[in-house]
């Protein structure tokens, strides 16, 4: 049985902003799973994302980088435990430096940094001409103009160990326990989870004198 892991499915667990290991495990074991319908405005998101993507690309090219964008940066790495796949927004090359950038339209999350760290860990595996002994690898999270300043990202051996361990956990045979919460369930699209909760379903809340 094939197991598929994507950076977006595990980045919240790596940053500890998410806790439900089961959701990542389920996605790894069910590549095309039924999803909950969403009223999210994808058209508006794509337009905003494209705006920040173009702005950052223009700045990188002004700074002397040769830049490849989105679909040109797709990767799929087949490992012993799972296949890891993804698509990097921007990859720039200048002199002896490779710069990996992910663009965001919303608020700043630590999971954004971890997403770039995953890309940085994977890059030498799908770019065989990259020589880490001769070339530098840097990362960045770029936000919609006016929202947040860009964040520089590093990826050391400790980060890589954490990443590989999470892949093995998400792709493993053992099914983790579910950890439902309104904050995570509200963004989860897995139809098959029977334990989904919302803020309205929380009980035991009362007013008290403190």
Image (tube, grey):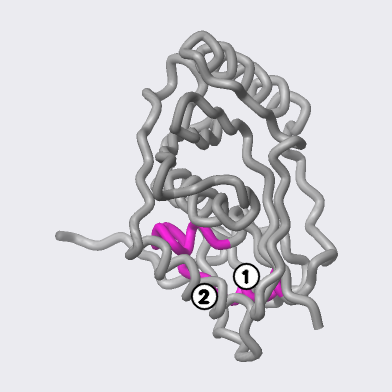
- Residue neighbourhood size for the residue with mark 2, other residues' Cα within 10 Å, grouped as few (<14), some (14–19), many (≥20): some
Q: Residue at x 72, y 27 (%)?
A: 46
Is residue 128 positioned above or below 18 on the image?
above
**In terms of depth relative to the viewer, which is nearer, 154 or 46?**
154
Residue 11 part of the magenta segment: yes
Q: Residue at x 71, y 20 (%)?
A: 47
Main secondary structure found in the magenta portion = helix
**Picture quarter with the C terminus:** bottom left
Residue occupying the far bottom of the picture:
174
**In terms of depth relative to the viewer, which is nearer, 139 or 96?**
96
Residue 23 - label = 1
Residue occupying the far left of the picture:
210
Rendered location of residue 91, percent (x, y): 58, 33
Q: Residue at x 43, y 40 (%)?
A: 135
- Whether residue 186 is visible to the viewer of this picture, yes or no, is no
Tell me how far mark 1 sits from mark 2, CA to CA.
9 Å
Q: Please give the range of residues in magenta.
A: 10-28
Rendered location of residue 90, percent (x, y): 60, 31
- Residue neighbourhood size for the residue with mark 1, other residues' Cα within 10 Å, grouped as few (<14), some (14–19), many (≥20): many
Quarter of the figure with residue 78: bottom right
Q: Is residue 55 left or right of residue 209?
A: right
Q: Is residue 66 left or right of residue 3?
A: left
Q: Which residue is mark 2?
A: 179
Tell me the mark number nearer the camera, choosing from 1 and 2: 1
Mark found first going from the N terminus, 1 or 2: 1
């Amino acid at each position: 049985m094939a197991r598929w892991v994507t950076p977006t499915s595990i980045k919240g667990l790596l940053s500890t902003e998410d806790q439900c290991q089961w959701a990542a495990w389920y996605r790894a074991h069910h590549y095309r799973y039924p999803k909950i319908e969403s009223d999210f405005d994808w058209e508006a998101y794509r337009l905003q994302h494209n705006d920040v993507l173009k702005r950052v690309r223009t700045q990188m090219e002004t700074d002397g980088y040769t830049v490849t964008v989105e679909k040109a940066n797709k990767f799929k790495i087949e490992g012993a435990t799972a296949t890891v796949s993804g698509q990097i927004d921007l990859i720039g090359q200048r002199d002896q430096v490779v710069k990996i950038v992910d663009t965001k339209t919303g608020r700043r999350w630590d999971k954004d940094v971890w997403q770039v760290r995953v890309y940085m860990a994977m890059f030498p595996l799908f770019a065989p001409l990259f020589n880490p002994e001769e070339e530098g690898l840097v990362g960045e999270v770029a936000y919609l103009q006016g929202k947040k300043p860009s964040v520089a990202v590093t990826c050391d051996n400790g980060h890589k160990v954490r990443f590989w361990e999470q892949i093995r956990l998400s792709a493993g045979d053992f099914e983790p326990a579910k950890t439902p919460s309104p904050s995570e369930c509200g963004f989860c699209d897995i139809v098959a989870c029977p334990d989904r909760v919302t803020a309205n379903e929380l009980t035991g809340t009362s007013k008290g004198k403190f």
